[in-house]
Structures are given as C-alpha cells and as structure tokens.
C-alpha cells in the first residue's frame, strides 16, 4: 500500500484514453478506446500508479488520500504539439503575408530580440503559461539561433517538471547578421546544449536546422554527423511548405533532385526526424520519408493563415508516412490543440478527407506521442505512464453547453469539443502529477 508521505492523489471523473489507432471510421476500431464514466486515476510521485473504475479502485486507496472530483468533466492524456516556435509568441496574428515575406518582415526581427537572456526568459515563461492553459503538456519547440534562448526554455520547462523537446536554430546564411551562426560554431553550441539538457529529467534535444535555404552544405553535413553520433536525439526542420520556398531551394541546391533530397544527402532523414508542413510533396517523396521512418507535422492553422496550401493526409496514410498534429505558432493562429483539430477538420473537408473526432483526439494524444517516439512515457492514461492529464469541460461556454446537452453519444460530445472548444474548455491541466493550470483558480 502506498503511504501518504509520497506525493499521491486521485483524480475522479469521466475518462478517455486511446490504446491504439482508432482508424478513420465513424466507429473506432475494437480495443482502441478506453472510456470510463466514473474513472479514477491514482497518481504517485508523478506517475500513474493505477487507473480504473472508481468503485473498483476505491477499496484499495489509502485512508485520507486527496480525491479531486472532476464529475461532469472529461479527463484525457495531456495534449502534444509536434511543431511550435516559442520565440514567435509575440508575433502571432501579424498580417498574413506568405511564408518568405512573413519570415523577413516579422520572424527574423522578432528572433533577434532573443540575444537578450532576460527577454528569452520572460517569453519562455509566458509561452509555457499559455501552452498549459490550453492543455498542452508536451511540445517539440524551435528556439532561436541564440544558445541562451534554449537555456531559457529548458530552464523554465525543467522548473515546471514538463516533458519537452527543443533545440537551437541552426542557420549560417540568408538571414540577419544577428541571427546567423558561425558554420561550425552553431554545432558546437548544439553539442554543449545536448550535454547540458538532453535526458535531464523530462527534457530531450532536437537538432534544429531552420530549413535548407538558411544552412550551407557544410552546416547540414555537420548536423548529420552530430545526429549519427547521437541516435536518440531528435531532428526538426521544415519541408515543402510554400511554392516560393521550393523554388528557392532548387536554385540553392541544383545538385539535388528535389527538396527532400537536400536533407537526404546529409543524413537528416531518419526515424526521429520531424519535417513540418510537407504540403507540396509527390507520392515518391512521401514513400521515401516513410521508408526512412520520418514524419510530417501537419500544421493546419498555419497553412491556412499563410496561404501555403492544403495538406493531403490521405496520401500520407497511403504511403505509410507517419503524421502528427501541430500548432506552428507563430504562423499558426492558436496554441490550442482544439483549434488545431478544428483546422485539420476544415482542411480535410476541402479535400474530401473527413477527420473524425476519434482520429483527431487520438492524433493529439497517443498518435503524436508515437510519432515523436515518446509513447513509452506519455500519450495514454495508463499504469506506469507519466501523469500528464488535461481535464475538459463540455459546458465551458453557453454555446458549448447548449450543444453538448443535445449530444447522445461520446462521439458527438468529442466532435462538439473539437469544433466549439477553445482555451476556456480546459478546466485543468496536470503535468508530472502536479496541477499546473486551473481555469477557475483565484
């Protein structure tokens, strides 16, 4: 029996978690969904000690244990964002130029400010406040080219006990002098940051070349060498987001047969590689990514906002290519995973590829965890897993309450949350067994 000198409590209420991909049908695949009307999550020292029906678990609980009652709410695994730029928090909703103009007009000037560690610290704290407020407990994060921006982010995440991936942007050309690296110095900085932060508590490192146009061949080659020597490190970059970007890559790398081949030449396409966007790919490129075990981060609100194009989720599925869901803030217009689901549904409707609520919430939780190779830790509410949990309120707003009052099934309620939910829908967020956000806290 667990004694109360440990950090232990129980969360009680309706519970939903996925055990496997539910498929794209209106009815989830058998065995893929775990739903309890009156569930209990017993947390001990940041992990889930037991989970089950409250009536069955109650006789085994220590006397006097704190029970947090979430009746009328819905507990799910914490949401996961596979691609986001914390340094772009303050330029969200800047006038929607297309990608390359947006980078030059907004992104690069804003990122220059992160040479100041005090500024980086302040934005890191604000970014984490916002992500937790919308129920996101894990993200794969672009910092800036300043090593201090990475130290600031990891320090803030570590203090809060969060599971996060992040990395220093590598760019040694085609940017302002205040952002461009020394070709090999940027890799030396990355190796120092890996040594300091990778594997520390719940943190992991992602090597982060911004995208092919801002790195020389020498920098890409050196990045590939670091990746080969540290196979448990992740890699994140951008691929085929915008047609102007693709044309620029062709000019800069005429020896490569296509954009993806630039990354292939330098050993950057592997099982832990996340390529954001991947809108303008042919099926051969999707198969090459799938064969390498790489993945694409689908960023619907960003793709719509910047006019980049519509992501073909079905073509990726047919190629066996893993995909994840991401906000891509600041190009994205909302940090909320619910907003990302709404955008993904709308893109799917335009392409004749309906996104069910089952598939959407799977992607936001276990699906994203699997794609990022983090499913041994997060993505499910299961015994032994890390206690990252979001609590949703189906009556968060008057309109949502009216809609969910008419829902006859869990599927209907989930779809209403996906389409009508926003930051107010997140009633509480737990990370590592600690409540890190409460909507109604004084």
Image: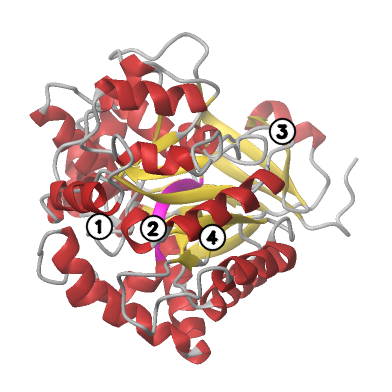
Circles 2 and 1, Cβ within 8 Å, touching? The answer is yes
Q: Quadrant of the N terminus?
A: top right
Helix, strand or loop status at disc 2: strand
User: Rounded to the nearest whole Å, what is the CA distance between mark 2 and mark 1?
Assistant: 8 Å
User: Rounded to the nearest whole Å, what is the CA distance between mark 3 and mark 1?
Assistant: 34 Å
Q: Earlier in the sequence, mark 3 or mark 2?
A: 2
Mark 3 or 1, closer to the camera: 1
Residue sitting nearer the eye, 217 or 210: 217
Instruction: Examine the rendering and report whether any part of residue 262 can be seen.
Output: yes
Does 82 appear in magenta? yes
Q: How packed is label 3: few (under 14 Cα within 10 Å), some, or many (20 or more)?
A: some
Residue that mark 1 sits on: 332
Mark 4 or 3, closer to the camera: 4
User: Rounded to the nearest whole Å, what is the CA distance between mark 4 and mark 1?
Assistant: 18 Å
Farthest residue toward the top? 30
Mark 3 or 2, closer to the camera: 2
Residue that mark 3 sits on: 383
Q: How packed is label 2: few (under 14 Cα within 10 Å), some, or many (20 or more)?
A: many
Residue that mark 2 sits on: 84
User: Rounded to the nearest whole Å, what is the CA distance between mark 4 and mark 2?
Assistant: 9 Å
Q: What is the chief secondary structure element of the magenta stretch?
A: strand
Instruction: Examine the rendering and report whether any part of residue 388 can be seen.
Output: no
Number of numbered tags placed on the structure image: 4
Q: Which residues are magenta?
A: 78-85
In the depicted structure, whether residue 209 falls above or below residue 266:
below
Q: Percent x, y for residue 130? A: 40, 67
Residue at 48% in and 54% down: 220
């Amino acid at each position: 029996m667990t004694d109360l000198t440990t950090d232990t409590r129980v969360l009680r209420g309706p519970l939903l978690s996925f055990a496997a991909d539910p498929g794209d049908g209106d009815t989830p695949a058998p065995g893929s969904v775990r739903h309890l009307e009156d569930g209990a999550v017993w947390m001990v020292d940041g992990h889930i000690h037991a989970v089950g029906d409250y009536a069955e678990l109650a006789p085994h609980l220590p006397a006097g244990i704190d029970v947090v009652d979430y009746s009328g709410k819905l507990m799910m695994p914490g949401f996961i964002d596979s691609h986001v730029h914390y340094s772009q928090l303050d330029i969200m909703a800047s006038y929607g130029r297309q990608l390359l103009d947006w980078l030059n007009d907004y992104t690069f000037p804003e990122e220059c400010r992160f040479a100041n560690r005090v500024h980086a610290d302040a934005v890191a704290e604000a970014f984490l406040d916002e992500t937790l407020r919308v129920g996101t407990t894990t993200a794969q994060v672009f910092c800036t080219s300043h090593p201090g921006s990475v130290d600031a982010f990891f320090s803030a995440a570590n203090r809060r006990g969060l599971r996060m991936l992040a990395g220093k942007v590598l760019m040694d050309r085609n940017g302002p002098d205040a952002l461009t690296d020394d070709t090999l110095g940027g890799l030396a900085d990355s190796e120092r940051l890996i040594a300091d932060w990778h594997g520390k508590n719940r943190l992991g490192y992602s090597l982060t070349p911004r995208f092919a146009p801002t790195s020389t061949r020498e920098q890409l080659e050196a990045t590939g060498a670091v990746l080969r020597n540290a196979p448990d490190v992740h890699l994140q970059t951008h691929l085929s987001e915008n047609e102007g970007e693709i044309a620029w890559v062709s000019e800069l790398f005429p020896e490569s047969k296509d954009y993806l081949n630039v990354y292939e030449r330098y050993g950057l396409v592997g099982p832990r590689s996340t390529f954001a966007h991947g809108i303008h790919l042919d099926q051969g490129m999707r198969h090459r990514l799938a064969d390498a075990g790489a993945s694409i981060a689908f960023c619907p609100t960003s793709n719509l906002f910047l006019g980049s194009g519509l992501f073909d989720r079905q073509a990726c599925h047919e190629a066996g290519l893993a995909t994840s869901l991401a906000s891509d803030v600041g190009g994205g217009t909302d940090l909320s995973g619910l907003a990302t689901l709404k955008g993904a549904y709308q893109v799917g409707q335009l392409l004749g590829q309906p996104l069910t609520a089952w598939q959407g919430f799977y992607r936001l939780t276990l699906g994203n965890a699997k794609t990022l190779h983090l499913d041994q830790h997060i993505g499910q509410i299961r015994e032994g897993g890390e206690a990252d949990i979001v609590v949703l309120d189906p009556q968060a707003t008057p309109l949502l309450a009216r809609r969910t009052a008419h829902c006859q099934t869990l599927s209907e309620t989930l779809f209403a949350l996906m389409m009508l939910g926003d930051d107010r829908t997140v009633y509480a967020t737990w990370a590592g067994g600690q409540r890190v956000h409460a909507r109604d806290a004084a």
